[in-house]
Structure formats: structure tokens, C-alpha cells
Image (tube, rainbow, N blue to C red):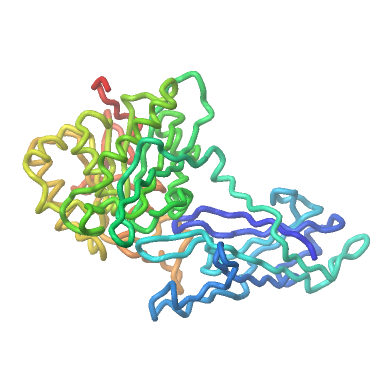
Amino acid sequence: MERYKTVTTITDFGPYVTKLILELPVAVSAASISPESFNVYVEKKDAKTGEILDGDDLFTEEERVRPMTGYPKVRRAYPCGRLGNYKNPGAFVALELEEEFLGKRTEGTMLTSAYIRSDYRVTLLHELNAVPPVGGLVFDELEEDICPQLDGWANGESKVGVVELKQEGGTPAAVHLKYGYYTPSEENQKLPLVIWLHGAGEGGTDPRIAYTGNKVVNISSPELQKKLGGAAWVLVPQCPTVWMDDGKEQLGRSNQSIYSAPLKACIDEFIAEHEARIDRNRIYIGGCSNGGFMTVRMAIDNPDFFAAAFPACEAFFNENITDEMIQTLKKLPMWLIHAKGDELVDPQETALPLYHRLMAAGADNVHFTYFNRMEDVTGMYRDALGRPRRFFNHGVWVHVYNDDCLTDFDGRYVMHDGVPVTLWEWMGKQASTALH
């Protein structure tokens, strides 16, 4: 039995195994390899028990057709080096897999997700032309997983960001907030800090979920780092339940949160630990859905602390926004993102009235990208007829991570110094003059 490596890609829809790397006893040429030479089988298992997942426990009746075992499609096979880079001839073979359900590395519900275990078995079906010929191999032992997008990322736990949660029986428990963070390589200079607050499905006790459950790691990509001024820190706190938890309801409409003080303490602690390298006048906060709610909550609770905010599909309800809150928020540079027809958070109860009230109050640096619908703009995802794939309208964070937010509420490009800017370009130009 032989060992294999997996390559994980953090996509618009979470982490997927997109490539398998197999080590061969001798180098082979590209001409001797084809996708048909390999049979790939996978079993999706509970990471703790090792048992094959039960779809009945995870999905609705309509979703249970999703298989927990099966044969992923190999779309390309080629000789490569140790890390999967093309090399002809090569002593390794890379099998590129389709981005499909069988390859997803996380599973869960709307309120929680977890990493699972994916066990692959790759069988070489045809003898490969080499010296000597290669045949009869079965790869079924994982050696390691490779994910270049996670370079520079690590996990931490706040010592002071503590929240009291009720356990079964009503007994309170003190829980520390965990977080993921990205450290830029540039030293000896103060850099911006981007704080991202996850949605409802990425809470829990594994901070990896908070920054890989969606493509949050793209904030550390060279493209977005450049738009933020060249380099920036990224902090992704994780709450055990949901940010909207007000102590009575987890998904209520009170606009209150038990996490307000613990989250601020966690942020302050992180900044203090990296005081010499974080610019306190360039602290940006954003989030999606539940995290969009918390973005607005934090901006209200901490006037003059943030240099800009970018709440996406935020669940902060207009009925509980006071005029005093509007007066506080109108001073903060803000870029709202939402989509018409959002299935989970109605923009007519949240983002639309917030935007109009801010503009009526005289806000001069507030923008709102309002999508008619959610569909792929990259050309990567298409439906059976070849048209851009339609997504559920709540998922505007896809356009946030890919920097597809360009226009204001009136459909015109957002401008800065007479030049059109994207969301991340605009944010990189914001700086607070307040002394923290």
C-alpha cells in the first residue's frame, strides 16, 4: 500500500480537496498518464469517530441524495514534483479533481460546521510505460495535506475575551473566544488590521472553520493585500454560538449581543500583542450575515475606533436602530453589500433602511452595492446550459472576497479622488484621525 497527499483549495464555497499527489517508484512521462489510468474512491467520515458520515443526520430530505462515499471525477492527470507542480518526466503524479460534493472537507448545518475526515483510495488501473513499467499500485494512506492559501495563518485564543454561556441545566461556563489570524511578512512598520466576523455557520470551537468555511483567506492573497496598501494583518474571531446571541435568543431581532464586550476585549488584546506592527488608525471591520450584524453592533458600541466598516447581508434590524445610533454610524466610512431577494436576511428590514437613514442624516462616505441577484462573474461556475451559475442571494460574501463590489446604490462606480475604486481599494484608503 502506498501513501498519497491531498491538496486543499479554499474556494468560494469552502475547502475542497482539488488534487491528489501520488509518489511513484520511478519517473514517468506525460504521454504515459491519463485520467482513465486511475480509479479514485473516497469515504467521508466523522473526524473523531472515524465512522462514515450519515447523511440523515446532516441534511434535509431533499439533500440526502448527497453521497458520503463515491468516485470523484479526475479531470486531469500529469507528472509533477513533490508539491504537485508540473514536471515532465516526474516521479510523482497529480490527479486534479472536480470541485464537487465528495471533495468538500467540511460539513454541517446553518448554525455549525466541522472539518471531516476524507479517506481516499487510488488504484492504478493500467500499467504505466516507464523503466521499469509501473503497475499494481494502490494508494490509501494519507501522508499530508497541502494548502498554500493558509501560509501565514495561525490560530489563537483570547485570555480576556471571555463570555458566560449557559450549559444544560442552566450552569454558566466561562468560554474564551478563539480566533484565526494572518501575519504579514513585512516587519518594522505599522500595517492595517482587517477584522472579519464570520456568519452563523462558522461558529464553534475550531477557528479554522471561521476563515476557511468561506474564502476569508483571500484577504491574505497578494491581490487584496496590495489593495490594502501592500500588506495587512487579518484577525478572524470565532464565537461559540452566533454573534446575534443576546442571551435569550440566538437569532432574534433585538440587535443586542452577549459578545459585544468579549469581542472588543479580544481585539484589544490582539492589537496590544502586536502593538509595534499594527496601525491603530487603520483598523477595518467587516462580516457577513451574523457577522454583518456584529459589524454594525461593534461600530455603534465603539465610536471612533474603526477606520471603516463593510457589513455584508447584515442582520441588524431597522426597528431597533435609534436615531442616536444613526448619528454615531454616519461618521464612519462604511460600504454595505446586500442582494435583492436575499432568502435569509430581508434587505428591506435591514440594509436598505439603514443606508437611507444614514444618507438622510448627512453621511458623506457611505456606499451600498446592491446586487439584483447572485451569480458567478468569474466564468468558473456554469449551469448545464453553459450560463453563469446562479447562487443563493444571501451569499454576497462571495463578491466581497473576490472584490467584485464596484458600484454604489445608484449604479455608478464608487470614486476616490476622481478614480473608480473597488471595495478593497476604497478600504485601503481609509484612515482614522482619532487617537485610540
Quadrant of the drawing holding the N terminus: bottom right
The image position of residue 60, as x and y in percent, is: 38, 76
318 on left or right of 427: left
Q: Quadrant of residue 167?
A: bottom left
Residue 271 or 88: which is nearer the viewer? 271
Quadrant of the drawing holding the C terminus: top left
The image position of residue 147, as x and y in percent, is: 59, 49
The image position of residue 368, as x and y in percent, is: 22, 46
Count of numbered circles in the view? 0
Residue at far right of view:
132
Q: Residue at x 46, y 63 (%)?
A: 381
Q: Quadrant of residue 63?
A: bottom left
Q: Residue at x 44, y 26 (%)?
A: 274
Q: Is residue 47 above or below residue 407?
A: below
The image position of residue 240, as x and y in percent, is: 37, 52
Q: Is residue 7 above or below residue 222?
A: below
Residue 55 or 139: which is nearer the viewer? 55
